[in-house]
């Protein structure tokens, strides 16, 4: 492998795949190196005893403009969640649904004890506001914390505690809602303008579809990069590749390591996902269940097998529980079971633990006013960075970063491509 390549993309996650795809469209020769045996990075799905286990609870918001650009939704066979959520509060479950998509159920949820009637009207006002104007306008708006923004909009503390903290806490992996209000407005727009979905056979199908569109032989698996110097990529097997341009699409911590820069853990958000199998689902619909009580480790729960039957073998259901932060407690599973017994009673005794995923760098930290550790695009001559860690924590940002970085490389290399 000691031969030159025009462009070397390091990292076969969504950002690296979209970068490679755009380079291919622009006629720029490249090779993509991925340390794993499959593409996707964080967006992978493992098969385990007949179950499909996404690497952490993930969804596709169909309104993402970059996802619409890069993905064939029909081939992904998307299955959608029920719009809205079930909120656990006061020992009971209360429904909050999108009245635009489910007007009859939405009318009844106006009178649920989660927040006030006025809070529900304010949600409608927020929806209307964030759907106006351009996305550029959202990301150029004044920046404050999500919590400050919600208070500025007049939401009651009860509504914030019972709904926004578990819902947005699960989206941002930040129950304190320190995340930038720009992200609040962006994700609320995406939830409002499209559906929340998963591919029929798991989120990993997104990465598989992107990889299938690359030229044969352009993606090399099992290639772990040891170092990057000038225009050379050094692999752990002792070989190296010289190139005119190198793209690091490797995530914040790995990028810092390759560049010899200290990485501060405050730049990342972590999550633990525990999967269980069960003969009966704890809820009867494909809806997100939120912890509005603020006690116990589980922030949110869902039953992926109710969204798509492919997630579990016949006669079984898959249950996904998400715990914010990276917990190394030996007793975490027991604590989750105890909380679920409080929610669902004796049926939890039949749940079987399948697998626990502790995802250290699930999202970049997006505290209001804090700049990313790295900026996307050209870092120095011949070296480019891309990924959501350079922008915002979303699938859309990863795709945009990969595409726009490839376009910058194509412009820079245009003189030698003629």
Image: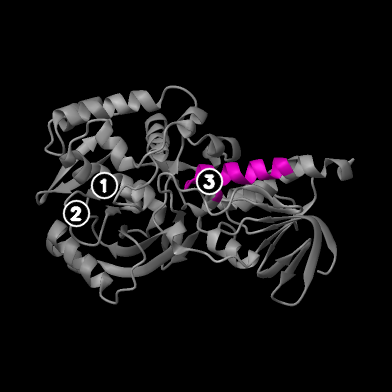
Mark nearer the N terminus (3 vs 1): 1
Residue 378 at what x, y percent from top left? 69, 48
Tell me the chief SS of the magenta region.
helix
Left or right placement of residue 285 versus residue 142 in this view: left
**Viewport quadrant of the N terminus:** bottom right
Residue 2 at what x, y percent from top left? 83, 69
**Residue beneath the point at 59% across and 65% down:** 261
Q: Which mark is residue 294?
A: 2
Q: Taking 233 as reference, is 25 above or below it?
A: above
Q: Which residue is mark 1?
A: 165
Q: Residue 54: tell me if it is visible.
A: no
Instruction: Classify residue 96 by image quadrant.
Output: top left
Marks 2 & 1, CB-CB < 8 Å contact: yes
314 and 251: which is toward the camera:
251
Q: CA distance from mark 3 to mark 1?
A: 23 Å
Q: Nearer the viewer, mark 3 or mark 2?
A: 3
Q: Which residue is mark 3?
A: 391
Disc 2, SS? loop
- Outermost residue, left direction? 90
**Residue beneath the point at 17% across and 49% down:** 88
Instruction: Classify residue 94 by image quadrant.
Output: top left
Q: Residue 94: tell me if it is visible.
A: yes
Mark nearer the N terminus (2 vs 1): 1
């Amino acid at each position: 492998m000691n031969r030159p390549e025009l462009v070397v993309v390091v990292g076969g996650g969504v950002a690296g795949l979209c970068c490679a795809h755009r380079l291919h469209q622009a006629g720029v020769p490249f090779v993509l190196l991925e340390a794993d045996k499959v593409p996707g990075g964080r967006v992978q799905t493992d098969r385990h005893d007949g179950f499909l286990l996404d690497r952490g609870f993930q969804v596709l918001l169909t309104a993402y403009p970059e996802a619409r650009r890069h993905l064939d939704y029909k081939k992904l066979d998307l299955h959608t969640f029920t719009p809205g959520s079930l909120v656990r509060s006061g020992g009971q479950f209360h429904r909050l649904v999108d009245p635009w998509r489910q007007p009859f159920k939405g009318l009844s949820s106006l009178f649920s004890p989660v927040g006030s009637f006025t809070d529900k009207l304010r949600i409608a006002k927020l929806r209307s506001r964030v759907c106006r104007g351009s996305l550029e306008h959202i990301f150029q708006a004044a920046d404050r914390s999500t919590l400050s923004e919600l208070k500025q909009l007049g939401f009651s503390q009860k509504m914030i505690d019972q709904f926004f903290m578990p819902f947005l806490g699960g989206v941002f992996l930040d129950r304190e809602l320190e995340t930038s209000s720009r992200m609040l407005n962006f994700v609320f727009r995406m939830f409002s303008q499209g559906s929340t979905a998963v591919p029929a056979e798991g989120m990993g199908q997104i990465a598989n579809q992107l990889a299938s569109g690359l030229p044969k032989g352009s993606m090399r698996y099992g290639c772990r990069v040891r170092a990057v110097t000038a225009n050379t990529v050094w692999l752990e097997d002792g070989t190296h590749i010289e190139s005119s341009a190198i793209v690091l699409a490797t995530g914040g911590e790995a990028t810092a390591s390759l560049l010899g820069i200290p990485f501060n853990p405050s730049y990342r958000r972590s999550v633990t996902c525990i999967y269980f199998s069960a003969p009966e689902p704890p809820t009867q619909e494909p809806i997100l269940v939120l912890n509005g009580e603020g006690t116990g480790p589980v922030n949110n729960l869902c039953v992926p097998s109710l969204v798509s039957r492919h997630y579990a073998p016949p006669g079984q259901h898959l249950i996904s529980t998400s715990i914010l932060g990276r917990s190394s407690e030996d007793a975490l599973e027991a604590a989750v079971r105890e909380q679920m017994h409080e929610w669902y009673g004796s049926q939890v005794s039949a749940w079987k633990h399948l697998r626990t995923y502790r995802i250290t760098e699930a999202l970049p930290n997006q505290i209001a006013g804090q700049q990313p550790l790295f900026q996307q695009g050209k870092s120095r001559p011949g070296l480019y960075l891309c990924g959501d860690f350079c922008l915002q924590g979303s699938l859309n940002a990863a795709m945009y970063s990969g595409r726009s970085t490839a376009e910058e490389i194509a412009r820079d290399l245009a003189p030698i491509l003629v």
